[in-house]
Image: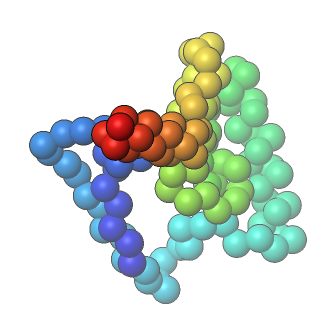
Amino acid sequence: TRIVEYKHYFHQESDYTVTVKEYSTDKGDPYYPVPNPANHELYEKYRELAQKEEEQKNVYFVGRLASYKYFNMDAAIDNALNMFNTIEKHPSQPDIEDGNQEAQTQQKASTVSDSV
C-alpha cells in the first residue's frame, strides 16, 4: 500500500492537493510486467506493433508496460514527460533528482544568508 501526493513531484505549491491510495492484491492481472521468456517474446511483438502505431498514426506508448520494466512513480511521470517533450520537440525537463538537488542548494544558500 502506498499513498501518493503528486504535487510534491515537481515541488508545486498549492493550498489544494490530490492524493492517491494504492492497495496491493493478488487478484486480477499484475500491474507490473513479469519478466520471463514467454512474456519477453510477447513484449517484442507488442513493441513492434507499438512502433508501427507511432510511425503510422502518431500513437505513443509510455510507462511500465510500454518499456516492459518496473518504474517508481517519479520515474513513470518523468518517462511520460520526456516522451511528451520528444513528441513536441521541447527540451527535456530536468530530472526529479536535479530538482531535488536544486531545492537543496537553494535551501543551503538560504540557510547561509540567514546566518550571516
Is 88 or 110 nearer to us in this picture? Answer: 110
- Residue that extends furthest to the front in the rendered view of this protein: 116
Give the residue drawn at x 19%, y 39%: 14
Q: Quadrant of residue 38?
A: bottom right
Task: Report whether residue 10 is seen.
Answer: no
Q: Quadrant of the C terminus?
A: top left
Percent from the top left, x then y, of residue 109? 44, 37
| Residue lying at 35% horizontally and 60% vertically, measured from the top left | 4
Nearer to me, 113 or 59: 113
Residue 59, given in percent of the width and then of the height, sits at 60, 29
Colour scheme: rainbow
Residue shown at the point (50%, 40%) measured from the top left: 105
Q: Is residue 84 above or below residue 37?
A: above
Judged from this view, the residue extending furthest toward the left is 15
Residue 51 visible in image? yes
Counting from the top left corner in percent of width and height, residue 23 is at 37, 77
Instruction: Tell me: 74 left or right of 86.
Output: left
Number of callouts in the render?
0
Q: Where in the figure is residue 61, as x and y percent of width and height?
A: 61, 39
Q: Residue furthest bottom?
A: 26
Relative placement, left or right, of 99 versus 69 is left
Work out whether residue 41 or residue 18 is closer to the camera in this orientation and state it. Answer: 18
Where, quadrant-wise, is the N terminus in this rendering? bottom left
Position above or below: 5 against 88 = below
Residue found at x 80% / y 40%: 48
| Quarter residue 20 falls in | bottom left
As drawn, 32 above or below 10? below
